[in-house]
Amino acid sequence: MKKIATYLLACVIAIPAVQAAGKAESTRHERNYIVDGNNLYRDERFAEAEVAYRKALEENAMNEIARFNLAASLLRQGNATGETAKEAVSILQGLARDAENISIAEKSFYNMGNLAFNEQNYAQAIDNYKNALRRNPDNDHARENLRLAQKRLEEQQNQDQNQDQNQQNQDQNKDQEQNKNQDKNDQNKDQNKDQNKDEQNKDQDQQQQQQQPQDQKQQPQQQQQGGISPENAQKILKTMENEENATRARVNAEKRKNGAPSRRAVTNPW
């Protein structure tokens, strides 16, 4: 993907003709530091350029050119998300908001647009490029980058929409697959339940079939063992004994009634 680089504001603000001696000396040092920083920047010695711009700001903390060029030198060092980048963005935001030099405000918006573009924050980049063009409609770089950012934003939105649709389709397919698996699991559970029930019924039938001969075998024994209770048996024996005694008494009575046959008297022969 195309990267957009920030650029350096290399011009120097003209020094007013009438100044106090002390102020003129300070302005000369300030200007010299900026010139030195610009030369170092062009040689890509960005850390040394940073030092020169900071010295210029020590002479005049409100120097907009020194502030802008310091931000540019910071952005050229290290990654764009570290502490140096945060300081650079803070400087550019301040210049875009309150710079008296409209050219510096324009270029601050332009560079912030480039930073947003490189971070794929195309909506923010578009807003910054538009602000740069409002301050300088002739900035062809800002206009070109604006069109490119608008194109990237459209592609990004289409890609996000496709990703959302794909994710939605995946979620839908996942839900359908889960429902299908759930239905299959429920069906298997029902089949297993019916099978277990059939097996239980079969086991019960087998147990009943095995129990029936035993019941039939035990039934005569129970009848034999439990037909007459001990009390009834005793009564029966007593009754039989009484009947036997009565019969014996009756026989004896009959014998006494009929009497024994009489014997003939025997006399002695003498």
Image (cartoon, rainbow, N blue to C red):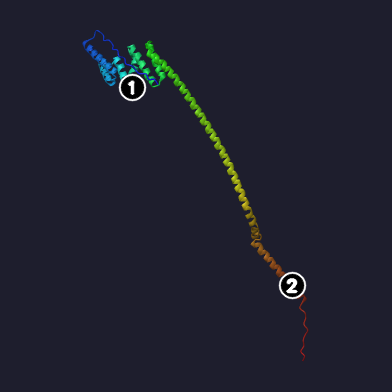
Q: Quadrant of residue 101?
A: top left
Query: Which class describes the residues within 10 Å of circle 2: few (<14), some (14-19), or many (20+)?
Result: few
Horizontal and vertical percent position of residue 109: 36, 15
- Relative to 192, does residue 9 appear above or below in the rendering? above
- Taking the image as shown, residue 132 lies to the left or right of residue 17, namely right
Can the viewer see residue 88? yes
The circle drawn on residue 251 is: 2
Q: Secondary structure under badge 2?
A: helix
Q: Secondary structure under badge 1?
A: helix
Q: Report the residue at 75% width, 75% height from top.
A: 255
Quadrant location of the N terminus in the rendered image:
top left
- Indicate the amino acid at tag 2: Val
The circle drawn on residue 85 is: 1
Q: Report the residue at 59% width, 45% height from top.
A: 199
- Relative to 165, does residue 96 appear above or below in the rendering? above
- Taking the image as shown, residue 20 lies to the left or right of residue 196, namely left
**Looking at the image, which is closer to me, 95 or 247?**
95
Horizontal and vertical percent position of residue 241: 69, 68
Label 2, label 1: how many angstroms apart (C-alpha)?
146 Å
- Relative to 189, does residue 79 appear above or below in the rendering? above
